[in-house]
Image: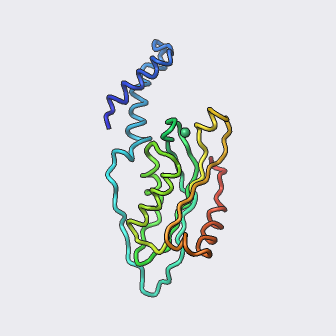
Amino acid sequence: MDKEKVRKSFQLLLEGLGVDLENTHYKNTAERSANAWVDELCSGLGEKKFSLTTFPVAQHYEPSMVVLQHIPVRSVCAHHLLPFFGEATVAYIPDDRLCGLSKLSRIVDYFSRRPQVQEELTSDIANFLCEQLSPQGAGVIVKATHMCMAMRGVSHDGVMTTSSLKGTFLSEGTVRAEFMALANTLSLNKL
Ligand SMILES: [Zn+2]
């Protein structure tokens, strides 16, 4: 990423908007914004794709669904560069490898920190999980409110839900039903 280019573009944005650049509040806005976009909002773009540390499942273990809920999602939409935010549920049924639960959060965070559309974020998370763990199946649900819908256009802050199902989550009705039931207990109170 080119932070200087990002800084200049924020400066140009402020000029284009015609705000009073003499006002003390704008003094370091371009630089502050560039730091926020490059180092935080879009840090996933600059980060190398990581590998999950995985563990073999014990022989006596009968694989069952592993689910992590209420994973915060904070991202930026590719169409308007405005934030969208909400929560994800990530689940999988292991085949012969497990990963640490916190890693499921880590995956969501890594893929969230870049401009994108929610549909692709959801499938990127599911694909990555499948690539790294080769599970029997995996499922991801993301529920988010989009500021590009809340602050412009229709000005409604509805919640958009997207899902991505893989393996047995797709092919077996009972697995899918178990996952959906769990994901629907998702609370959006913290939005
Ligand atoms: Zn948008």
The one nearer the camera, 36 or 173, is: 173
Q: Residue at x 56, y 46 (%)?
A: 85
Relative placement, left or right, of 33 versus 90 is: left
Relative placement, left or right, of 70 versus 60 is: right
* x, y percent for residue 29: 44, 24
Residue situated furthest front in the rendering: 171
Quarter holding residue 156: top right
Relative placement, left or right, of 64 versus 3 is: right
Residue situated furthest bottom in the rendering: 60
Q: Residue at x 47, y 16 (%)?
A: 24
Q: Residue at x 39, y 47 (%)?
A: 44
* x, y percent for residue 87: 57, 53
* x, y percent for residue 88: 55, 56
**Colour approach in the figure:** rainbow
Query: Is 126 drawn above or below residue 18 in the view shown?
Result: below
User: Ligand 1 is in which quadrant of the figure?
Assistant: top right
Q: What is the count of numbered marks?
A: 0
Q: Quadrant of the N terminus?
A: top left
Quarter holding residue 146: top right
Query: Is 96 drawn above or below residue 76 in the view shown?
Result: below
Q: Residue at x 39, y 34 (%)?
A: 35
* x, y percent for residue 131: 38, 65
Quarter holding residue 49: bottom left
The one nearer the camera, 188 or 6, is: 6
Query: Is 173 drawn above or below residue 9 in the view shown?
Result: below
